[in-house]
Image: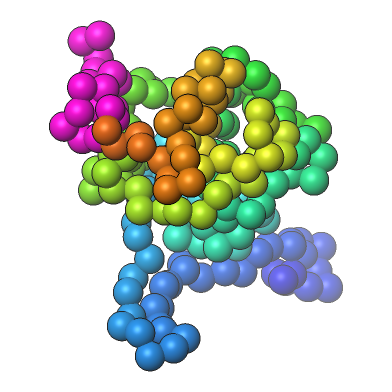
Amino acid sequence: MTLLPGTTTATTATDCATPVQFYFAVDNSKVAARRVVVSSDKCNACHVDLTFIHGGNRGATQECVICHNPTLADGTSKQSVNFATQIHSIHRGNALANPYVLGTTNYQDVGFPGDLRVCATCHVNDSYQVDNVGATALVASPGGFTATTPPIAAACQGCHDDKATAQHAMLNTGTLGESCIVCHGKNAEFSPDKVHSRTQ
C-alpha cells in the first residue's frame, strides 16, 4: 500500500498483521494443532523481526512450513528447501562441507552468532530429539547425494552435509523407515545432547 499517496512524502509499505493460526479438520478426525518445532520468538532473538523474509508479510515460523515442506526444492540448484534442511544449511553456512546455494545466493558466507551445538537456541520442547520427529515423508533432494532423503536424515544433513554422513544414513534406512533412534535416540549412546555437548 502507499502511505500519503499523491504527496511528496508518499511511501510504499507492506501492511500485514501478526499472523494467527486456527486449526480445523477437513474430515471427521479430531482437530490437532501443528507440531511446534521452533518458535518465532527464538528466531527473533537474533533476527528481531522475521517479516524481513518474503517482502514482510510472513512473520511466524508456523507459516514457513506451509510452503517449505518436503516436496520443495530450488529450481536452479535443486537443493532441498524443506524447512529443516534449509534452516540448518543456512545457519551452518560457512562450516558446510558443500556450498548451500539457492538460485544465485551462496550461503557459505553465513556465520552463526552462537554455538550450533545448542539445539535449544532455536528448538522448543525437545523437538530436535530424534524420538520426537514423527515425520515420515521423504524430502526432495535432487541436488544432493540422493533424489530423496528420509526426514530425520534430511534434518541432520542440513548441518552434516558430507558424503560419509549421507552414506551412514542410507545404511541405517530401509523399507520400514529410519533406525536413527537406536543410536541417536534421547537416551542412546550418540544422542544429540551427548554428541553436541559443549564438553566434547
114 or 102, nearer to the observer: 102
20 or 62, nearer to the observer: 62
Judge left or right: residue 161 versus residue 6. Answer: left
Q: Which residue is located at x 57 percent, y 31 percent? A: 90
Q: Quadrant of the C terminus?
A: top left
Q: Position of residue 12 (x, y in %)?
A: 74, 62
Q: Which residue is located at x 51 percent, y 54 percent? A: 137
Magenta stretch holds residue 131: no
Q: Position of residue 59 (x, y in %)?
A: 51, 58
Quarter where residue 199 is shown? top left
The outermost residue toward the top is 200
Judge whether 57 appears above or below 113 on screen.
Answer: below
Q: Is residue 159 visible?
A: no
36 or 174, nearer to the observer: 174
Q: Quadrant of the N terminus?
A: bottom right
Q: Which residue is located at x 62 percent, y 42 percent? A: 148
178 or 141, nearer to the observer: 178
Judge left or right: residue 123 versus residue 94. Answer: left
Q: Which residue is located at x 36 percent, y 37 percent? A: 179
Q: Over which residues does the magenta segment extend?
A: 183-200
The outermost residue toward the bottom is 28
